[in-house]
Image (spheres, rainbow, N blue to C red):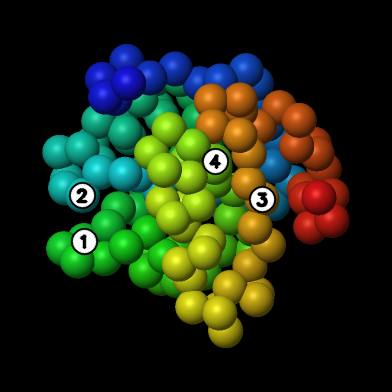
Amino acid sequence: MRDFASYVPIGGAVAKLKSWERQGAEIVYLTSHRNVEGLRHDEHVLRKHGFPGGPVLFRQSEEAYGDVAERALPDILIEDDCESIGGAPQMTYPHIKEEIRSGIKSIVVREFEGIDHLPDGLGDLEGF
């Protein structure tokens, strides 16, 4: 599970993200890595599998995932449920300040199950 360079997309994730991008979404990725070397591995995997371009953000020094999300200020945050590493306490959305969190739509998917079940229409994500 820690051989990040060998990761492959789940299901139709690449096609789904490309579709959302064509509809106007700006795709931003959040990595678990905390250094530039790990970031480069993730960027390589994303390019290798044809994911849409977009910045890959990582936690710096003492930052938590919530801090990174607050910097990015997404309209929609899609993340997995972090079941294999402890569940909700490890997720991003719960750690975003409440006044910021209220402006972000949170979508949680089951770990390792992908995003194929999410709506194809970007506008439909808001009501999901």
Label 3 residue SS: strand
| Residue 105 x %, y % | 68, 62
Mark seen at residue 60: 1
Of the pair 26 and 13, the residue shown nearer to us: 13
Which one is in front in this view, the residue at disc 4 or the one at disc 2? 4
Q: Would residue 77 appear left or right of 34 to someone viewing this image?
A: right
Q: Earlier in the sequence, mark 1 or mark 2?
A: 2
- Residue 5 appears in view: no
Which one is in front in this view, the residue at disc 4 or the one at disc 1? 4
**Marks 4 and 3, Cα distance to the nearest angstrom?**
8 Å
Q: Earlier in the sequence, mark 4 or mark 2?
A: 2
Report the amino acid beneath label 3. Ile
Q: Which residue is mark 2?
A: 34
Q: Earlier in the sequence, mark 3 or mark 1?
A: 1
Residue at the image point whose x is 31% and y is 44% from the top: 32
| Residue 50 x %, y % | 49, 24
Of the pair 83 and 97, the residue shown nearer to us: 83
Q: Which residue is mark 3?
A: 107
Q: Which residue is mark 4?
A: 80
**Marks 4 and 1, Cα distance to the nearest angstrom?**
21 Å
